[in-house]
Image: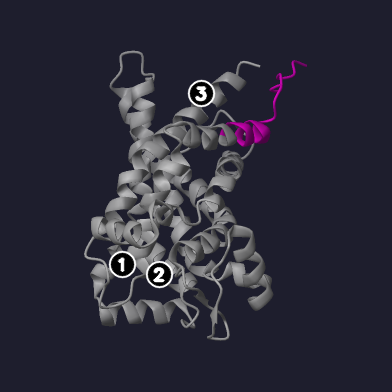
Amino acid sequence: MIQENKPFIPKLAQDLIAGTVGGWAQVAVGNYALNSHPFDTIKVRLQTQPSPPIYKNAMDCVRKLVKEEGPKGVYRGVMSPLAGIGFCNAVMFMSNGYFRRVLQNGDEKKALSIVEIGIAGSLAGSVMAFLNCPIELLKVKLQTQDPKGVIGANGKLEAPYKGVLDCGVRTIRAQGVMGVYRGMSVTLMRDAPSYFAYFVAYESFKRFFASMREDKQATTVDLLMAGGFSGFAAWLPSYPQDVIKSCFQNDLRYKSTTEVFKTLMKTSGTKAFFNGFAPTMARAFPANAATFFAYEMAMESMSKF
C-alpha cells in the first residue's frame, strides 16, 4: 500500500508560522504599528467624542490633540496592539486554516467555494474576538483618557493610566476579569462578518487577478492588491459595530450596547456610525497587503519541505 507523504511541518503549524510572519510584515513595512497607530487614535477619538462634537474632522482632531499633548498624544495605547500583532495574526490564520480543513472534511485537495471560504473566515473571526476585545479595550481606554485623570467605576476622578499594564490591572481590580471583556458581544458581531468579508475579498480578487494571467498564477502585485482590497472589504460590514464597541468600552455609564446605539441615533443620527471612517481606510490597504503577501510567501516556502 502506497502511503501519502505527510508534510514535514504540520498544516496547523504552517498556518501559525505563516500568520506570525504576516504580523511581522506589518511591523516591517514602514514600521506599521508606529506609523499607522495615529490613524487608529484619531479614529477612536472621533468615534467616542461627545455630542455636540469637539472635532470638526480628522485633521482638526490631529491639530487639537498635538496642541494639547504634543506628538505623543497620537501614540496613546500603542503598546497594546504592537505587542499583539504577531500573536493575533498567528491565531487568525491558524484558526482560518483549521476551519477550512474542517470544511474540506479530510480532503485537502478539495477546492472550497467562496462561500465556504467566507464561513471559515467568519468562524476564525469569532475566535479572534476573544483576543481583540481585551486588547482593544485597553487601547481605547488609553487613547481616550484625559491627561488630568480618568473617571473610575465609582464615578470619581482617578489618576490617568501610566500604560497598558497599569490600565489592565486597574480595570480588573475595579471590575473583575470580565471587565476587560466589556463589549465582547458587539466585538463578536463585528468580527464574524468582518473576517467573512476579509477572506472572501482576498480569495475573490486573487482568483480574478490570476485568471487574467496566461499561466493562471497570481503575481506579486496581484497578491499585494488582493490583500489591500481585502482590508477595505473587512470594514464595510463591520464599521458601525466598531463605533458602538469603542463608545461602550470607553464610557462606563453605558449599561448596554443597545443604549449606545439609541444614544448615537438620538444625538447624531446615522452619520455617527461612520465617525473616523476616513483614517481607518487610509491605513487598511498597506497593512493587509503586507500581511497577506508575507503569509503567502511563508506558506509557499514551507510547502517545499
Residue under the image location 59 percent in, 68 percent down: 181
Q: Magenta segment, which residues?
A: 1-18
Name above or below for residue 15 compared with residue 237. above
Q: Which residue is mark 2?
A: 244
**Could you say where residue 237 lies in the image, as x and y percent from the top left?**
35, 57
Lower sequence index among marks 2 and 3: 2
Q: Choose top left, top right, bottom left or bottom right for residue 262.
A: bottom left
Residue 25 image label: none
Q: Circle 3 is placed at which residue position?
A: 297
Disc 2 + disc 1, Cβ < 8 Å: yes
- Check disc 3: other Cα within 10 Å, few if <14, some if 14-19, many if 20+: some
Q: Is residue 199 left or right of residue 126?
A: left
What residue is drawn where x is 78% and y is 16%? 1
**Mark 1–mark 3 distance (CA, rounded to whole Å):** 37 Å
- Residue at (41% x, 57% y) in the render: 73
Q: Amino acid at mark 3?
A: Met
Q: CA distance from mark 2 to mark 1?
A: 8 Å
Residue hosting label 1: 273
Query: Toward the viewer: 37 or 17?
Result: 37
Amino acid marked by disc 1: Phe
Residue 198 inside the magenta-drawn segment:
no
Residue at disc 1, secondary structure: helix
* Res. 285 visible in picture: yes
Residue 178 vertical position relative to residue 91 in the rendered view, above or below: below
Residue 303 position in % (x across, y down): 60, 20
Q: Is residue 218 visible?
A: no
- Furthest-top residue in this view: 215
Point out the tag, 2 or 1, that comes first from the N-terminus: 2
Q: Is 304 placed above or below 244 here?
A: above
Q: Secondary structure at mark 2?
A: helix
